[in-house]
Amino acid sequence: MIKVMVSVRVNPTEDRGTVHAAISKIFPGNEPVFEELSKYSGTFSIEGDINSLENIHYLIRQEQIIDTARTQLSKSVSRDGMSTFFILSKQVATVGCVNFPAQEEPLGSIEISIRADSPEELLRFFDWLTPPTEEGIPDFENDITSV
């Protein structure tokens, strides 16, 4: 089973409602939980399964960034081959799009951790979310139930 953890920091200079709206646009149907860290800051988080990533699956194809997404997932695979981590731009998420920043942004990024029960399951997840492509066109499209 794929486990998804999403976390995004709300800084004192940011509007909590704007950050909530951004994360909700990328993860619709998943109500973020807010943990207050101080009077002016906190963290939104979402715990879910592979279904939490259906909108990202759609957006990656809509924005034609499958290869970029696959590279981002691949470069952070754990030593045991059962987890990966990537970040998305919080600012770009406010307009309902995904962008993989080169590094953590000054005001923080949306952090997504993926954990599988086996290395084989993580590879099936990669092939569902970001299949190999030929000239930007997926070689195949797996159904979510194949993961």
Image: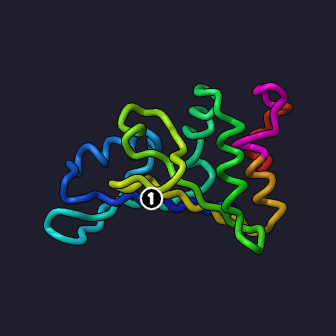
Quarter assignment of residue 84: bottom right
Q: Could you tell me residue 16's position as x and y percent?
A: 23, 51
Q: Quadrant of the N terminus?
A: bottom right
**Which of the 4 quarters of the picture holds residue 100?**
top right
- Residue depicted at x 51% and y 38%: 98
The answer to whether residue 21 is left or right of residue 53 is: left
Query: Where residue 54 sits in the image (x, y, percent)?
Result: 59, 41
Q: Position of residue 6 (x, y in %)?
A: 48, 58
Question: Where is residue 11 shown, x and y percent of the image?
Answer: 25, 58
Residue at 38% across, 56% down: 108
8 in relation to 79, above or below: above
Q: Nearer the viewer, residue 87 or 102?
A: 102
Residue highlighted by disc 1: 46
Q: Which residues are magenta?
A: 127-138
Residue drawn at (79%, 34%), measured in percent from left and top?
141
Q: Secondary structure at mark 1?
A: strand
- Seen from the viewer's position, the closer of residues 34 and 133 is 133
- Which amino acid, mark 1? Ile
User: In the figure, is residue 141 to the left or right of 38?
Assistant: right
| Label tally | 1
Left or right for 129, reference 87: right
Q: Is residue 95 magenta?
A: no
